[in-house]
Amino acid sequence: MEKDSDPPFAVSADGVNQTDLPIPIDAVPDPLVVFDAEGIIRGANRLLGGLLGFNASELIGQPVEMLYPDADRSAHRSVRQTFLSRASDLSHTSDTLQPMRREVFARKRSGALIPVELSMMLVPTAVGAMFTASMRDASRHVEIEKALTEAADEADAANVAKSRFLGTMSHELRTPLNAIIGFSEMIQHETLGPLPHVKYADYVQTIGVSARLLLDLINELIDLSLIEDNSLRLKLEPSNINEILDECRSVIAQKAQTQGLKLRLLLPKGPVAHPVDPQRLRQVVLNLLSNAIKFTDAGGTITLALSEDAAGMKIQVADTGTGIAPSVLENIFDLYVRSEADRNVTAGGLGIGLHVSKRLTEAMGGTINIASTLGEGSTITLSFPPNTAIPANER
Ligand SMILES: Nc1ncnc2c1ncn2[C@@H]1O[C@H](COP(=O)(O)OP(=O)(O)OP(=O)(O)O)[C@@H](O)[C@H]1O
Ligand SMILES: [Mg+2]
């Protein structure tokens, strides 16, 4: 190891004279090596000695490739040639050659390798063009990157485990729930004989409705686990979008009416055909419509509209409801994001609907956007480009 009292670790008798270089190499704050066009080391500063553990006498006159791992030597040689030829190309113009920066491994005297940020420049000197290569120790950098990658891998693994658990649990819950729904329907219809008390009819209806709500929620969780796992597969097929939207309208018409909401469906005259997964598109539109109903007071209007032009197909769900505060709007499509408005506390929901809708829309080649003004209402737009490029894994 060099000590401060050692002679400057820079230029030897057979090296370049320090005065030939435009910079005093020991004043450079990074480890630096100077070599000529043939790649012969002509000088190095004290910091380079410290970093790699060499003495001046061991370096001067040696090929610069000795500072790199064996396997990388020819690559370094060709980089140097490229750099030189670029420099000669530039010599006719007023452009300057930018330093070349790369992350590489350097070889220490002990043979150990360390990652360095290499910055190479070509410097004109009295004895011809010289390369200067500064090597900044990047070990710390690499360590941090490794720690970050490991942390991200762990988080990914935890996420996969979580969504697998969610998926398995949801499947397990669905089976007994289907029995509850089936048998409550039998009782409700008094299939095997009349109910002994009139109140039982009410109770069994409540059981059926609650079980169906629970089933919806479980199906949503299963979708979510598939989406998070990237294992959701859609079946895109040419579909009549007008029909799909009309079905969605009829599903929620009763609910909208009960809540005193006006429901409008605006369809273009001709049929709009587009490749979608009809069941999934229905699910997205119903999600949006159920939000619109949930967040709009009696007297309000909900509009479901379809349009098509050269830019593609658009499906919009607009409401005249509460609207969404800008702070919530910012990441409204993230999982579990919900506004803290009173209505949301009473309305229930997990904050999954919009996230799932976004992922499903994207899997069908579309995009989803939301515009909302607090107190005035919200409009959610699904846009599909013409002839949607269907992702290969979804075909
Ligand atoms: N049409 C809308 N008007 C006002 N706020 C809305 C509307 N749609 C969504 N939001 C806001 O966005 C939040 C997230 O919606 P999202 O559909 O993801 O979840 P949710 O409806 O609360 O629950 P879930 O859909 O999982 O049952 C809602 O909680 C609400 O705060
Ligand atoms: Mg919702």
Image (cartoon, rainbow, N blue to C red):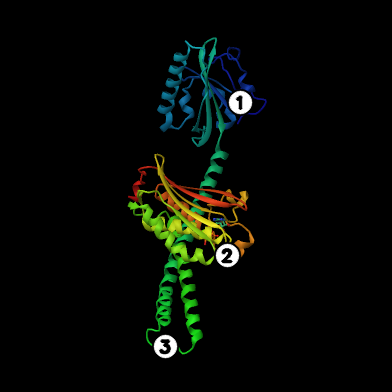
Query: Which residue is labeled 2 in the image?
Result: 347
Whether residue 23 sits left or right of residue 164 in the image: it is right
Q: Amino acid at mark 1?
A: Arg
Check the image and report above or below for 59 versus 51. Answer: above
The answer to whether residue 38 is seen in the rendering is no
Location of residue 207 in the rendering, given as x and y in whole percent from the top left corner: 48, 77
Dot 2, crowdedness within 10 Å: few (<14), some or many (≥20)? few
Query: Which residue is labeled 1 in the image?
Result: 46
Check the image and report above or below for 309 versus 9. Answer: below
Q: Secondary structure at mark 2?
A: helix
- Is the C-beta of the residue carrying label 2 under 8 Å from the nearest atom of ligand 1? yes
Going 54% across and 64% down the picture, which residue do you hit?
260
Check the image and report above or below for 172 versus 366. Answer: below
- Residue 194, disc: 3
Viewer-nearest residue: 214 or 126? 214
Whether residue 175 sits left or right of residue 347 in the image: it is left
